Image (cartoon, grey):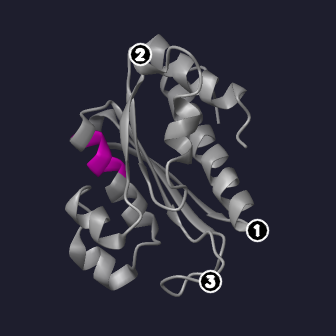
């Protein structure tokens, strides 16, 4: 389970900036949205989310280019970036946070279990990403992905406010 302080810190940083976030989740199946809606007051900053587990939904709901999905499959950094931008626009949030990857037990699209791509799309076409190769059980990979996604978003928010130097 994700440390409860991390979602609270993300929400506090968003509220401080008067900003909102939307999530697009694949392998985590809603864990990030659940983590962000656990702290009280979440509605001040969490706009909503999409669980696009099927590849086809990534294109239809989030606007991920079909040519990209056909060429690279659903587990690719550009797909995560397109998902983040897509959910940001769909929900009209200030930030879009997206994850795609392989939780297992089998490889997908030629990518090994534990391959994860996280992306944040922000104002003024800002885009940040994190590519991971995680290990452990399916549950651990999903939980670790949730933590890494929230950590990336918090880092983006801190850098953009001048509070964080790395």
Residue of label 2: 44
Q: Is residue 70 left or right of residue 60?
A: right
Circle 1: is it few (<14), some (14-19), or many (20+) Cα within 10 Å? few
> x and y percent of residue 130 in the render?
56, 55
User: What is the span of residues highlighted in magenta in the rendered image?
Assistant: 84-89
Residue in view at x 68 percent, y 51 percent: 143
Q: Mark 1 highlights which residue?
A: 135
Asked if residue 98 is among those painted magenta in the image, a careful observer would answer no
Quadrant location of the C terminus in the rendered image: top right
The residues tagged by marks 2 and 1 sit, at their Cα atoms, a distance apart of: 34 Å
Residue 124 % position (x, y): 28, 35
**Residue 23 screen position, x and y as percent:** 41, 43
Badge 2 crowding class, 10 Å Cα cut-off, few under 14, some 14 to 19, many 20 or more, is some
Q: If you read the primary sequence from the N terminus, does the residue marked by circle 1 or circle 3 appear first? A: 3
Which label number is shown at residue 4?
none
Disc 1 vs disc 3: which is toward the camera? 3
Q: Is residue 138 above or below residue 21?
A: below
Q: Quadrant of residue 4?
A: top right
Of residues 137 and 9, the one nearer the viewer is 137
Image quadrant in which the N terminus is located: top right
Residue at 71%, 25% in the rendered image: 5
Crowdedness near tag 3: few (<14), some (14–19) or many (≥20) residues, C-alpha within 10 Å: few
Q: Residue at x 36, y 35 (%)?
A: 48
Tell me if residue 87 is in the magenta stretch: yes
Q: Which mark is residue 106?
A: 3
Q: Position of residue 58 (x, y in %)?
A: 31, 63
Q: Main secondary structure of the magenta part?
A: helix
């Amino acid at each position: 389970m994700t440390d409860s302080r991390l979602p609270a810190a993300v929400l506090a940083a968003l509220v401080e900036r008067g900003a909102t976030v939307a999530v697009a989740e694949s392998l985590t199946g809603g864990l990030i949205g659940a983590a962000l809606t656990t702290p009280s007051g979440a509605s001040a900053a969490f706009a909503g989310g999409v669980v696009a587990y099927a590849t086809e939904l990534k294109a239809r709901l989030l606007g991920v280019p079909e040519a990209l999905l056909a060429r690279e499959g659903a587990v690719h950094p550009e797909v995560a970036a397109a998902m983040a931008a897509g959910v940001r626009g769909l929900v009209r949030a200030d930030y879009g946070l997206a994850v795609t990857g392989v939780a297992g037990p089998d490889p997908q699209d030629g990518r090994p279990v534990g391959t994860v791509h996280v992306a944040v799309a922000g104002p003024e076409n800002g885009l940040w990403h994190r590519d991971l190769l995680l290990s452990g059980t399916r549950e651990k990979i999903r939980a670790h992905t949730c933590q890494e996604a929230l950590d990336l978003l918090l880092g983006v928010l801190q850098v953009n406010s001048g509070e964080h130097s790395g």
